[in-house]
Image (cartoon, rainbow, N blue to C red):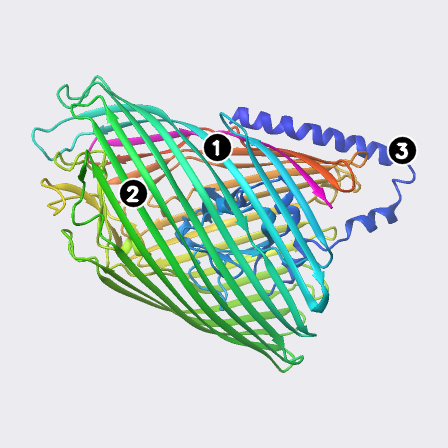
Amino acid sequence: MKTFTLASLLLLCPALVLAQQEVDRAQSSPTQNNQLERVSVTRQQTDTDLRRREPVAKQLYGRDELDKYGDTQLSDVLKRLPGINVSGGQLRMRGLGGAYTQILVNGEPAPPGFSLDNLNPAQVERLEVSKAPTADQSAQAIAGTLNIILKDAPRVVQKDLRLGLAYASEKPVINAGFTYGDRVVGGLGFVVPISVYQWNFKNELDGERLTNGNPTPPAQRQHVSNEGYDRSHGRGLNVSPRLNWKLGDDETLTLQGFFVDNRFHSDGENTVTKLPDSDAAYMPRTLLETTRNSGTFSANRVNLQYNNRFNEDRRIELRAGAGSGGADFDFDFEGRGGATPISRTTTGKNRNHNATLAGKYSQYAGEAHTVTAGGELERRVRDENRRTVENGVDLLPGIEGQPFNATITRTAVYAQDEWEINKQWSAYFGVRHEQIKMESEGSRDNAGSADFQSTSKVTTPLLHLNFKPDPKGRDLIRASLTRSYKAPDVQQLINRPSINTTDPLAQGNTKVTPDRIGNPSLKPELATGLDIAYESYLPAGGLISVGLFHRSITNLIRTDQPRLQTVVWAPTQRWVITQINLSKAKTEGLELEVKGRAGELFPSLFDPATALSLRASLNVYRSSVGDIPGPNNRLEGQQPWQFNFGADYRLKSMPINMGFSAQIAPNFDVRQSALQSQESLASRSLDAFAAMQISKQDGVRLSVNGLFQPKQGTRVTFTDLPDFNLNERKPVAWWAVNWEHKF
């Protein structure tokens, strides 16, 4: 931590020194000390201004935030935002896992298998982060919702070219993007953003495992350490064209495309070494494991939207969309040095097809009410196939290799009323009823039938209130009382086993290396939420926000403790885990956010003319699961706190911007069941950038992401056994230089 703090200060010191130099120049120059010039520069429409005008609590981030570090992956932008962290490409809000956070693209659910690493920020117009649901969007958002708004057609011609070179390990990679947009005759406008990118990472791995519960007599003790590496590399292509057609003064037609295509490869090597206290007859002294994985991912979607404002009182919006995509992979594993060499190949593929229809109608009701009603229909079909062959023989004959088909149908209706009560009070009332029906078809196999049906029906009432203490002021008090939920996905429901191949089927496994099977009886989690926040908007565009939230969850979905069972897919008993519904859980937290110009936040320390912006956020979380004894019976993966801070500085004497952003979270334990706990290691990271405008058309940006990251990983332990499983990885920093040219 001392190294991290010192490095942060070293990066910040040059910005503060330069800031003071600029202040000295301003004080010695009558022209720069002119108050009128300051006012003309600082007052612009900002993301904070737009946030203040939203009828419900929402954080907005536009081009300034998206372009600041020259990122090529949207996940790098998101990890710097208050209350958000990204782990393995999965978005986590309020410390809760990806399944608790809803990701939308232009207001519709993101494609299956979509990762935030698949999208270049250059293709995004803005980000909308909502912590409480609204009626016109799905309420599958216990932690919150991220709505990714893709780039819109510009008002004037836009031709931007971006070229970049980045390095993390072994060899550099390239990225490039081109955006072309214009308004043409006949009310037509278009934009075509294209991005191509590569990645190449190599992480060092190490771990340790103790198992002492093999069901095959005699009892055998295995204590091993492992070390090695994994390398991931690949390339991707994003295209998100948009066509706007203005049919009349208040009538528009929009066609939006969204296309992602990735090719990925990975390989790794792991050396497993027996430690002295292992059972001497259990395993050889060393075992060399190598892995190779390659595959593809694609997602294609086209949406058509029609908007018409019939008059000042009525408007309608109609949407239709269709999409397809899928993934395939080929994973090879070889183990050498044991009594029997192992050669295992797993192949799989899935295909997704979906279609959506939606519409909503809004009408003013008197001078104070805007009433909206709407409905949505989505149908998604998934086909999947997977097969594992070990030493030339099917690992699970009659189970894997069989086709699997699932159909998900989602329907929703909703109504809402936005009520301007008076100059101080406004309210948003809404109710939404949503149904998700899943049907699976698959052949009968050795594990039983893969067929199942599951229907989730949830009605979610919503209330949002805004209060302005001073009708002429800018400050707001916001409060929300909402209902949200999380439905189980297909993989959690399907009654097919997933084998942990660490231990052979004929030998048996341990609590540390259990198999997994789905549970068709899972019910959706339901959450009742309360959010209260005070937002103070400063005159020069700064913000101070203090918020509290509470979620009371029933039917919590949690992985059950490993159980030793007689199974149909192995000749010996196996330890098996599945997911079950627990009775209840709760989570609450405190959210603090401060951002603005240094002279406005600390007027006694900085001159108002100092072009230094500061930001910081602190998020404190607490949670408990009712059916699991404490201590640390937290919700899965939720850290106790997270602290982000950063600064940006703009030189006045030279066209240079610079800044940094840091994120810190502690290590923490989660009691997963009465017998099992998991410890997550502490995390910290530092990003920095420096950008120079060479000419009116050209700019260069240097950046680094992920400096000073410690080892990341988890340690699983048991209260009734000495068994444990520790896995660690050492991530690497990502260095990049980008050049942008505006034609």
Which dot, 1 or 3, sits closer to the camera? 1
Q: Which residue is mark 2?
A: 347
Q: Position of residue 647 (x, y in %)?
A: 65, 38
What amino acid is found at the position of numbered circle 3 in the picture? Ser
Q: Is residue 228 above or below residue 58?
A: above
* Residue 668 against residue 582 in the figure, above or below: above
Q: Which residue is identified by label 3?
A: 28
Residue 553 x %, y %: 36, 58
Q: Residue at x 67, y 62 (%)?
A: 189
**Which secondary structure lies at badge 3?**
helix
Q: Report the amino acid beneath label 2.
A: Thr
Q: CA distance from mark 2 to mark 3?
A: 71 Å
Q: Nearer the viewer, residue 283 or 153?
A: 153
Q: Is residue 321 left or right of residue 527?
A: right
Is 503 one of the magenta-colored residues? no
Q: Count neighbours of disc 3 (C-alpha within 10 A) and say few if under 14, some if 14 to 19, many if 20 or more.
A: few
Question: Please, which residue is most extreme toward the left here?
Answer: 217
Q: Is residue 29 above or below residue 62?
A: above
Magenta stretch containing residue 735, yes or no? Answer: yes
What is the magenta range?
A: 721-743
The residue shown at (22%, 24%) is: 223
